[in-house]
Image (cartoon, rainbow, N blue to C red):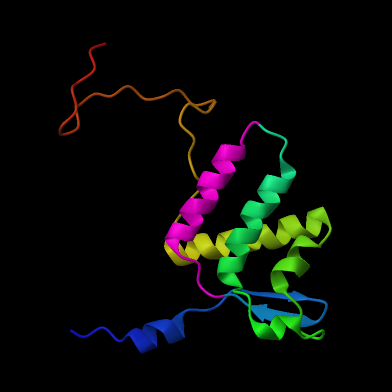
Amino acid sequence: MAFDVDAWLEAQTPWTVTIRRRRYHAEPVSVLAVFAFQKDVEALKGTTDTAGYQRAVERLLREAFPYRWRMLLPWHGDPVRRILALRPDAQQAVLRDFFEWTATRLGVTGSPTTPGSNSDAPTPRRTTAEPGLVPISP
């Protein structure tokens, strides 16, 4: 069975954002770019460095909207700068939608889990050992 890359690429729906009646189409973001973003955000946890977070977001968005000469045209504009210039609530809504699209495209489902996070549900006791693991005695 042959794989048709052209058909697969054509089936991919790009993420779009409309700002001031101008629609911008994002390019797919690589898994490596998402991992680099996550690493940057993890390094900023526990700090109040909002400028560092904005730089991390800008780098990720630049992956989706690479800098092009036409961004110099006044009627086109730079989508990354326009997104970052939005009010905080509007920017958050745009980024949430962008991350949902990216996660869906990369095949990520559900919310990320954090080891050791607080939970109301008790952790179930392991009854059988998984292959390669030492059983825990009660």
Q: Residue at x 51, y 45 (%)?
A: 39
Q: Quadrant of residue 44?
A: top right
User: What secondary structure is the magenta-colored segment mainly?
Assistant: helix
Magenta-drawn stretch contains 43 = yes
Q: Residue at x 53, y 63 (%)?
A: 102
Q: What range is drawn magenta here?
A: 27-46
Q: Which quarter of the image is occupied by the N terminus?
A: bottom left
Q: Which quarter of the image is occupied by the C terminus?
A: top left
Image position of 13 (left or right of 136): right
Image position of 131 (left or right of 116): left
Q: Residue at x 58, y 44 (%)?
A: 41
Magenta-drawn stretch contains 21 = no
Q: Quadrant of residue 75?
A: bottom right
Image position of 4 (left or right of 49): left
The one nearer the camera, 137 or 127, is 137
The one nearer the camera, 136 or 28, is 28
Which residue ends up furthest to the top in the rendered image? 138
Estimate the x, y position of residue 108 in percent, counting from the top left: 44, 56
Q: Quadrant of residue 78?
A: bottom right
